Structure formats: C-alpha cells, structure tokens
Amino acid sequence: MSMNIRSLAAASLVLASLALGGAAFASGHGAHGGHGAKARSLPSLTQEQKTKLDAAAEAEHKARAALRVALAAQVDKGAIDRNGVKPQVDAAKAAAANARKVEEDTLTPAQKAELAKAGEAKRGEGRKHHGQAGHGMKLTPEQKKQIAERMKAEPAGDRGVERMVDRLDATVPVLTPAQRAELAAKLRRQ
C-alpha cells in the first residue's frame, strides 16, 4: 500500500513540475522568474545592480522559453528526442549559469545575507504551490503508476533543465493525445 502511495506521490510531483512549465521545471526557476528573481526584489539594490540582474534574467528567460517551445513540439509528437533539444538545453544551462555568476558578482555580502535570510523564510511556501500544479492533467491511476515507474529509471536529484527533460520523457508517452495537447499548450504559454 505504501508503495502505491509513493508511486502516486511521485507521479503527482512530476505533473506538478510539468504543469508549471516543466521546471518547477525541475529547478523551480522556470515558474518563478529564473535565477535572480528574489535578488531583483531586494530593496537595497542600486539601479546599476538591477540593470545587470535584469539583463541576465532576460537572457535566461529567453533561453528557457526557446527550450519550452522545442519541448512543446516534441510533446505534440508524443515522444521526447533528447538530441533534438540538446541545443536548447545547452543554451538554457549556459544562461542559468551566467545568471548565477552575475548574481554572485553583483550582490554585496550584505545583500547576499539578506537574500539567504529571505530564502529561508519562504522555503516551505513553494512546496505547497508546486504540489497543486498538476491538478488539471486528469491522469488515471494507471497513468500515475506508469509515470512513477518510468521516473525510477531517470537519474535522481535536481539537475535543472535536464530534470525537466527527464520528467517530460517519463510522462509524455503515457499521456493521451488530448493530455499531450494540453501539456504542450502549457509549455508554450509559460
């Protein structure tokens, strides 16, 4: 019985991340403004800092949007071709790494401490939000079970956009054409 509950929970988490644009889209950045979103809200930022963080965030947003569009096309086809999205995955990873570096190089030690403190206070809130996101897919118990089984074959851990591709790869073959169309539309809207 507990294995069935774990399987259902795993499938629900997969769908939650996918419904948020995939990241939840794995690292959670896709649904929350990318790297630096919280940093850009710090009241202590100078205009120069905001400009640097905004430019890096915009580049990351564009790279993730291109990846979501490429993935949506594959969702429409019913299978994920990892080689087919490799250029977009690589671009999204590079943009995320750049955004992290810009944030690290731009913030003062006091701002980094302020950001860490704000992150600790909000840590539990995001999980509640993520847990509700997969609701609209209307999966059958059998689909949830199949997705959970397929996810067992994927590497564990938070690997950013690669984790998003893993989740889609595990989920898409199990979906009906209508569910795939809904998921592809969500990916394009993000």
Image (spheres, rainbow, N blue to C red):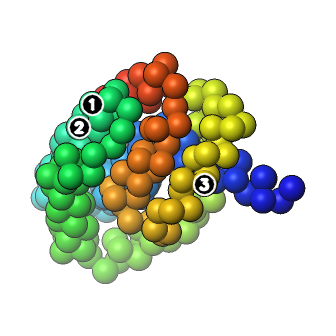
> Which image quadrant for residue 26?
bottom left
Locate residue 31: give its quadrant: top left
The image shows a total of numbered marks equal to 3
Residue 16 shown left or right of residue 109 in the figure: right
Q: Which mark is residue 182?
A: none
Q: Which residue is mark 2?
A: 70
Q: Is residue 136 above or below residue 161?
A: above
In this view of the protein, which residue sits in the foreground, 108 or 77? 77
Residue at horizontal 32 percent and vertical 52 percent from the top: 34
Residue that numbered label 1 is attached to: 73
Residue 29 percent coordinates (x, y): 38, 53
Q: Which is in the foreground here, disc 2 or disc 3?
A: 3
How far apart are labels 2 and 3 at the CA level? Answer: 25 Å
**Residue 95 image offset from top left, x and y in percent:** 18, 58
Question: In the displayed structure, does residue 80 sit left or right of residue 136?
Answer: left
Measure how far apart labels 1 and 2 are at the Cα level. Answer: 5 Å
Q: Earlier in the sequence, mark 1 or mark 3?
A: 1
Front residue of 72/95: it is 72
Callout 1–callout 2 Cβ contact below 8 Å: yes
Q: Residues within 10 Å of mark 2 (few under 14, many from 20)?
A: many
Secondary structure under the numbered disc 2 in the rendered image: helix
Q: Residues within 10 Å of mark 3 (few under 14, many from 20)?
A: some
